[in-house]
Amino acid sequence: MRELPALLVLALSACSLAPRYQRPELPVDPAFPSGAAARPDRAAATPPGGASAGDLGWRDVFPDQRLQALLALALERNRDLRLAALGVELARAQYGIQRAQRLPQVSGSAGVTRQRTPADLNSSGRPVTGDVWSVGAGLAPFELDFFGRVRNLSDAALEQYLATEEARRGAQLSLVAAVARQDLTGRALEAQAQLARETLAALEASLQLTRRLVQAGRVSELDLRTAEAQVETARFNLAATGQQQARSANALRLLLGGPAPADLPPPRPLDGEPVMGDLPAGIPSEVLVRRPDVRAAEHALRAANASIGAARAAFFPSITLTAFAGTSSAELGGLFGAGSAAWSFTPRLNLPIFAGGALRAGLDVAEVRKSAAVVGYERAVEGAFREVADALVSRTSIEGQLAAQVARVAAEERRLQLSELRYRSGVDSYLTLLTAQRDLFAARQQLIQSRLDRLTNLIDLYQALGGGWTERAAAGAGG
């Protein structure tokens, strides 16, 4: 038994036949496109040192108190996120099972065996029936991991667990972005509803004016009926916006895992900067590898790399140990008496000689899976780069659209004022006034949508850069 500790030390310090891991080169450009051709001043969005939005927690990016309260509530109650967390716990338990195989398992036992020995196997020439009592501790079959098979299987299970943890972080990031988008959509719909109410009130006032003008004989009944139709159209638009608001509230409730509290801070308008306005992109080589989906793909690649080591080790001999130490006796009362000590030590050597090509096929499978994992990693990087690039290019365009839309609304407001004056004085027809009212309503609607598009773009950029899942953000989720 003195050889057993030395063999265990050798087993626990086994070598590994897994290939040396090397992260694949990023198959993307060294810099993100930022729309500098259209807006040269936006090219300096990345500060020195490569810092990016991925370094920011969601509380930094979403300073609005109402939105922070909703995000904290969703991170606590959302059921999809809870399922992802349970998946992490399952992967952690599976890794614990695999890791336990790297250590010897010792168990105590006590029992009695009643056996009959035939006459031709007994020196007395007669069959003998007797009992054997035993108490002791036994070593379960334990593989001496000289070539790292068990170790590599354990490493593969660890990487799979870490990949599952990254998937949970990715789910958290997606939830943060979805809640932010839905809350801002609700605010945009409320702004649309307020616009519809104001427009309805203005059209009703215009209708009253048209009725007086008809009574005075200054305009025809056609203008009156046209004004009435516009009032009903405004009422239809208000009702349709109310329906959209109800659906938006239901979508937000699903994300929150229940109704929102009644004591939430009041929502700020879309132009009140509920989202950080300037999100630096950073450097692709430093940013993309921190995204949860890219990190999950890399852990899957590491797991496949370790599986190759396990497949290679299967070609080599393996040694399994089984041992027992305790006391045995033919009588229960003699278990711990003098001379009752018993032990056994059984090393077993398993040498693969012929397996019909199964070992070679197993190694081929492991190598193909690694090649597939490399492709999966590269695809994840390319997809991440595209998402960031699309968000950056859209940011420049959206900023220009918003500025143009603000100027358009101002021009349409002045146009309506002039049209009302000319209509009252009888210079222009009601059609001119009607056209000005419609164009102003459409311009204000588009301005609300442009402001929502700008904020949504910032959320998309933050999600694409892999922000919101850092330890700082996770700590903030607790309140």
Image: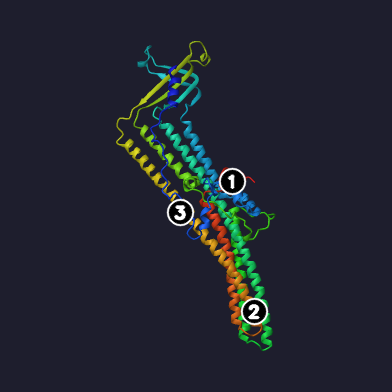
Residue 184 occupies quadrant: bottom right
According to the picture, the residue beneath numbered tag 3 turns out to be: 386
Q: Are marks 3 and 1 in contact (CB under 8 Å)?
A: no
Q: In this view of the protein, which residue sits in the foreground, 351 or 334?
A: 351
Tag in front: 2 or 3: 2
* Other residues around mark 3 within 10 Å, as few (<14) / some (14–19) / many (≥20): some
Q: What element carries label 2?
A: helix
Q: Which quadrant does the N terminus fall into?
A: top left
First in residue order: circle 2 vs circle 3: 3
Q: Where is residue 401 in the image (x, y as percent from the top left)?
A: 54, 64
Q: Name the amino acid type tagged 2.
A: Glu
* Other residues around mark 1 within 10 Å, as few (<14) / some (14–19) / many (≥20): some
Q: Position of residue 173 (x, y in %)?
A: 54, 49
Q: In the drawing, what numbered circle is on residue 102?
A: none
| Disc 3 from disc 1: Cα separation | 25 Å
Q: Where is residue 438 in the image (x, y as percent from the top left)?
A: 59, 75
First in residue order: circle 2 vs circle 1: 2
* Other residues around mark 2 within 10 Å, as few (<14) / some (14–19) / many (≥20): many
Tag in front: 3 or 1: 3
Tag in front: 2 or 1: 2
Q: Name the amino acid type tagged 3.
A: Arg
According to the picture, the residue beneath numbered tag 2 turns out to be: 420
Q: In the drawing, what numbered circle is on residue 473?
A: 1
In this view, the residue farthest toward the top is 338
Q: How is the image coloured?
A: rainbow
| Disc 2 from disc 1: Cα separation | 53 Å
Q: Name the amino acid type tagged 1.
A: Ala
